[in-house]
Image (tube, rainbow, N blue to C red):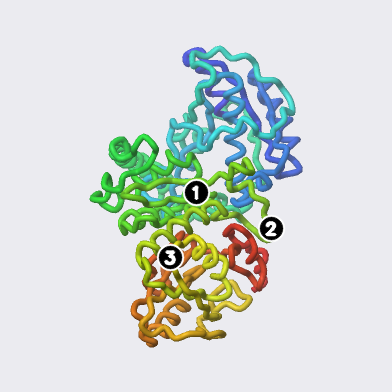
Amino acid sequence: MALAAGLRRVRDVLGVELLLVHVDHLLRAESGEEAARAAMLAQRLSLPFTSRALKLSPSEIHPHVGVEEAARRERYGVLFEAASEIGARAVATGHHEADQAETVLLHLLRGSGVHGAAGMREWGGAPYPSAASRDISPKMGRPPACEVSTPRGREPALWRPLLREPRSAIGAYADCLGLPWIEDASNTDVSFRRNAIRHEVMPLLEARFPGATAALARYADLAAADDDALQRMTGEALEGGVDPGGRLRVAAFAEQPLGMRRRIVRGWLARAVGAEEISASRIDAVTALAQAGRGGSCVEIGRGWTVCLRRGMLSAERWRDDRQGGAMGDEPRADGVARILIDAGQIRERTAEMAKVLDAEYGYDVPLLVGVLNGAVTFMTDLMRAMTIPLEIDFMAVSSYGAATQSSGVVRILKDLDREIEGRRVVVVEDIVDSGLTLQYLLDVLGRRNPRDLRVVALLKKDKPDALEVAVDEIGFTIPDEFVIGYGLDYAGKYRNLPYVAVLDPRMYAGE
């Protein structure tokens, strides 16, 4: 309300009309009463007002993020939708200096780089893509016609005019005008990370280092200047490094320092896959893929997207099944599936590529494909059907999981090969390389039997820092360190028949 009062005083100078928007997140019983109080304050300021309520709770709309982040996404979505409806130039929010300090500290504690340290900007775009289909309902008030110079259809800007103002100064201004505070009761709940920073960490910092809040906000300005310079350099690299089809040339950034390589990959992916957030570990995995130069390899980056390296070009791919008319995320999910990582189409395409590599490698040497039971059966079946050269197959069975979600560290041979491999060209076919312990054990055992050569083909390899370094000749997909199921992979004997690879819902093994 202090922001609204301040903007009302300068609206003639700015040449704008104002609309106050209240968002009901459906998180607290008293939210309806707060909307009514906000409407009364708007009437007191003689400003138009609308209150909008979500029809679903934020956590139902965004089930895979925390309630704070889910509410933030929906709040911005509603605000920008309301702004677009009336052709507004900007969405103004009341973030102040203490909010900036908290944001910087939260980002640093998450391990963010310079971009995260820059915190919030006074001016920017919508933090998330606008959703025209957002399911909200007006509760009171109607948006008025608003005369602005910006054409309709143009994305409104995000403006934080109070970002450099101390909370105390804003409170004093509100008190001077006799404006009461509307305090969200959940703001005192320190189980939320930002509230813990606000009520527990920042007071300790201010007590030990007076002026810490202002210093952190000032640091954000310094980091923002550095970030802007690096972003310009990244943009220049992308202008010359991305072909008309949206693929990134590895040669365009391979000689750059690591920090710039990461930024170029992140910037390219932001363009290629939209505004979906990509973790630092996935950025590093794509960067490593480019540096390794292993043509045909792919890295899963989440939400149905995969990055593949072919002929010196990185491409971001999201498979669509035209027979069903839907994207990967539209496949029916089995109970216990948290999310689909790699769909059936992606698996088919990558398996065919790997089969071509093996055909070219072995010609008519008749390789012996050794499938590792039970998980590799599905992959090995599709792989050998895609191969065109003569081949033979055999199987071994080992165990290091049982019914658990973590490798036990103890490997046992449950079934050995049915034939001798001395002098043979052997290809070990694995479903997944996790800790590397099982694969290393198998290679040691088979290596002592004097094969002519011994290669490894794996559908999946986990991005696991503490895993054993085991040479894998062909990798289908590099995936995050999560427990996955489907396409031969199981949990307690189930899910092997799923046509895709998915992350198991942690609730399925919460008691372990």
Residue type at numbered disc 1? Trp
Q: Quadrant of residue 53?
A: top right
Q: Quadrant of the C terminus?
A: bottom right
Can residue 381 be spotted in the picture? yes
Instruction: Say which quarter of the image contains residue 280.
Output: bottom left
Residue at horizontal 55%, vertical 84%? 415
Question: Looking at the picture, which amino acid does disc 3 mark?
Answer: Ile
Q: Residues within 10 Å of mark 3 (few under 14, many from 20)?
A: some
Can residue 211 be seen from the camera position used here?
Answer: no
In terms of secondary structure, where does tag 3 sit? Answer: loop
Image height of 148 relative to 399, above or below: above
Task: Please provide percent x and percent y for residue 473.
Answer: 37, 67
Front residue (pair 361, 439): 361
**Foreground mark, 3 or 2?**
3
Distance (Cα) linking label 2 and label 1: 20 Å
Query: Are the residues flagged by discs 3 and 2 in contact, CB closer than 8 Å?
Result: no
Identify the residue position indicated by label 3 in the image.
Answer: 389
Q: Which residue is mark 1?
A: 305
| Quadrant for the N terminus in the image | top right
Query: In this rendering, would 364 be left or right of 413?
Result: left
